[in-house]
Amino acid sequence: QVQLVESGGGLVQAGGALRLSCAVSGRTFSQYAMGWFRQVPGKDREFVAALSRSGGITYYADSVKGRFTISRDNAKNTVWLQMNSLKPDDTAVYYCAADNPPWEWRVTATAGEYDYWGQGTQVTVSS
């Protein structure tokens, strides 16, 4: 079993920044590709960013490209999402997720491909 715990959410003004963390325990962290998703009430969960097992390949949603950065430290079993230039439209519950990919470099934006999920952390961006 794999446990994921997000932290770092909060309230920030538009234009500000937040750094989300996701601590992973239970299995070998380096075997998982990692992703961040977000969800607002009444809408489907939306892909934000993904990172390959080694961290060499990243993939971003167009809506966050150039503003958000996903990174990981396999020695610390942690993945981060640095969010800059935040907008009110970024307001959501943010979830990290772990994918046990069939090959080294696979990253995916498809929520159904992920095997484990955290409980989420609220990010609110005020205008």
Image (tube, grey):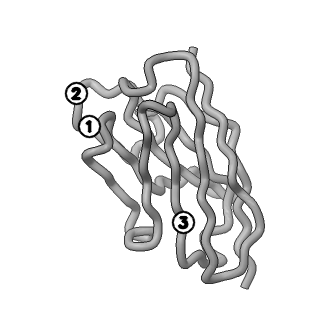
- What residue did someone put label 1 on? 106
* Discs 1, 3 touching: Cβ within 8 Å: no
* Discs 2, 1 touching: Cβ within 8 Å: yes
Q: Residue drawn 62% across and 24% down? A: 3
Tell me where residue 112 appears, x and y as whole percent: 46, 35
Can residue 62 be seen by looking at this rendering? yes
- What residue did someone put label 2 on? 103
Name the kind of residue labelled 2 in the image: Trp
Q: Is residue 10 above or below residue 21?
A: below
Circle 2 crowding by C-alpha within 10 Å: few under 14, some 14–19, many from 20: few
Which residue is nearer to you in this view: 16 or 108? 16
Q: Residue drawn 47% across and 41% down? A: 111
Which quarter of the image is occupied by the C terminus?
bottom right
Secondary structure type for disc 3: strand
Secondary structure type for disc 1: loop
Q: Is residue 79 above or below residue 67?
A: above
Tell me where residue 75 appears, x and y as whole percent: 44, 31
Distance Cα–Cα, label 1 vs label 3: 23 Å
Name the kind of residue labelled 3 in the image: Met
| Residue 48 shown left or right of residue 1 in the figure | left
Secondary structure type for disc 2: loop
Can you tell which mark lies on residue 91?
Answer: none
Q: On the image, which quarter does residue 107 sit in?
A: top left
Mark whose residue sits in front, 2 or 3: 3
Can residue 41 be seen by looking at this rendering? no
